[in-house]
Amino acid sequence: MVVGIGKIIFRLHDCRSLKGKRKIVKSVIHKIQNNFNVSIAEVGSNEMHQRAEIGFAFAGNSINVINSKIDLLFNMADEIGLAELIDTEMEIISL
């Protein structure tokens, strides 16, 4: 079994409240879930309305497939355009 985990950090411009941040984060998460079979959630910077951290996990049986899916997810997160992608992290674990 292969598990791929990662984190995406966004900068949210013109976001002045946690309510506005929540709307953007939910929209990003929903768009990613519609395109990938992935577990995804906001995992950090919960009280900062100019920054969002989203974590995700994939499971599969091939390192190449998981790596490809993570790359596609990062590209899509950048192309959504609701927030500026400022950093990404990923790790692939083979069990």
Image: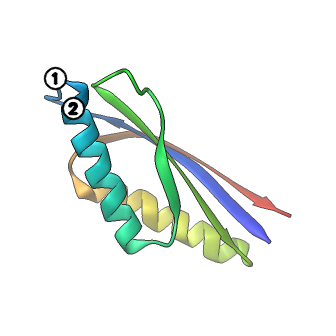
Residue at screen point 41% across, 27% down:
46
Residue at screen point 43% across, 57% down:
74
Quarter of the image with the N terminus is: bottom right
The image quadrant of residue 77 is bottom left
Is 9 drawn above or below residue 47 in the view shown?
A: below
The residue that mark 2 highlights is 19
Which is more toward the observer, 10 or 20? 20
Is 71 drawn above or below residue 81 in the view shown?
A: below
Label 1–label 2 contact, CB within 8 A = no
In what element is the residue under mark 2?
Answer: helix
Residue at screen point 19% across, 24% down:
17
Amino acid at the residue labelled 2: Lys
Amino acid at the residue labelled 1: Arg
Residue 73 marker: none
Quarter of the image with the C terminus is: bottom right
The residue that mark 1 highlights is 16
In screen coordinates, is 85 left or right of 2?
left
Q: Would residue 83 be seen by someone viewing this image from the given angle? A: no
Residue 18, horizontal then vertical, whole percent: 25, 27
The image quadrant of residue 57 is bottom right
